[in-house]
Image: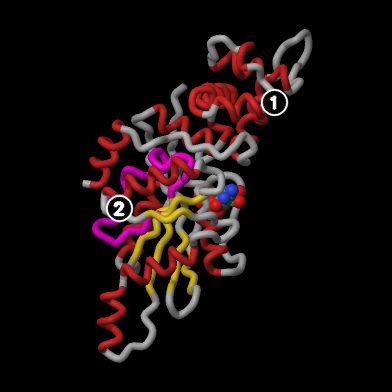
Amino acid sequence: MNIQWFPGHMAKTRRLIAENLKLVDVIIELLDARIPFSSRNPEINSLINNKPRLVAFNKSDLADDKVSGQWIQWYANQGIKCILINSITGKGLNEVKARAREMMSEKIERERAKGKIFTPVKTMVVGIPNVGKSSFINKIVGRATAVTGDRPGVTRGKQWIRINQEIELLDTPGILWPKFEDQEVGLNLAFTGAIKDDIMDTSEVAMELLYRLSLLYPKELYTRFKLEPASIKNPEPLELLETVGRKRGCIISKGQIDYSRISAIVLDEFRGGKIGRITLEKPDERDLKDSQELFL
Ligand SMILES: Nc1nc2c(ncn2[C@@H]2O[C@H](COP(=O)(O)OP(=O)(O)OP(=O)(O)O)[C@@H](O)[C@H]2O)c(=O)[nH]1
Ligand SMILES: [Mg+2]
């Protein structure tokens, strides 16, 4: 499958970030804790120049704690402190605020020496579509201000939000590279819902997801769909989708599987965390090499 992504507002997003950069002190980069590598935008470094950057792993409630710990450690080795957050409950958001001010402590001190009592730290949230930017802003501000949605691409405009005298935020639309060099990255974005379902073949996405789960989280997968490990000798993507489809009674007629229905169920349950707390990428050698390039 070849996933392509050509959003009309991509160029606009680039311009918006470039324009607002000079107004901002700290960039808050939201990553999806389930796919910390694929949810990075490879263009982010060139887009934000040398702005101080704070990395927050959102949707940490859906991710595997053990693997999140490995990622935190891995980023720490690169000299980058990451914070695990949940934009629905607000977990980790106070740490984000404190950390953003800490990063600007020199500026705050300088301003104070000049007699300025309050120096709000100006921040900007960036991240791929559907990563939770609007939810993050709503929660950190403490009231519903930015529009959220369960589909990518909901936010189109921009808005500055003053949280208090300490911190200000700018909401920006999600950023995604126009073309995936790596098919695996494209699939990870599809699994988690960063790419609109209607531009993909959901059956293919669902069976690829099942296949990865059978390798990474077999216990969770088999438990959720009541599968007998012995009945699946050599898990293949299509066989997994068909088995799960039969288990859930997604049959059209004459034993024919209703692929679109079972695919929607699989994706929905994965995204809702019903299969378990799952992280699809570990900081292995490949990621290490690629990411080091990204950080240069
Ligand atoms: N479980 C969980 N769900 C979250 C979290 N943060 C956001 N969500 C959900 O993820 C979906 C997308 O959230 P949004 O805040 O609309 O994401 P966004 O980045 O603003 O999306 P676009 O504006 O479309 O780019 C919504 O269904 C949120 O409820 C989180 O920390 N945990
Ligand atoms: Mg939004």
Q: Which image quadrant for residue 205? A: top right
Q: Say which mark, if any, is on residue 244.
A: none
**Horizontal side of residue 36 vs 209, given as left or right:** left
Residue shown at 64% from the left, 11% from the top: 231
Residue marked by disc 1? 261
Mark 1 near ligand 1 (CB under 8 Å)?
A: no
Is residue 154 at least partly visible in the picture?
no
Front disc: 1 or 2: 1
Residue lying furthest bottom in this view? 115
Q: Callout 1: 10 Å neighbours few (<14), some, many (20+)?
A: some
Is residue 105 at least partly visible in the picture?
yes
Marked residue nearer the N-terminal end (1 or 2) = 2
Residue lying furthest left in this view? 296
Magenta residues, dominant SS class: loop
Q: Give how far apart the Cα atoms at labels 1 and 2 are.
A: 40 Å
**Tag 1's secondary structure?**
helix
Q: Which image quadrant for residue 15? A: bottom left
Bounds of the magenta segment: 31-55
Residue 94 vertical placement versus 234 (above, below)? below
Residue shown at 41% from the left, 33% from the top: 185
Disc 2 marks which amino acid? Leu
Whole-percent x, y for residue 53 in the image: 33, 58
Residue marked by disc 2? 47
Of residues 274 and 3, the one nearer the viewer is: 274
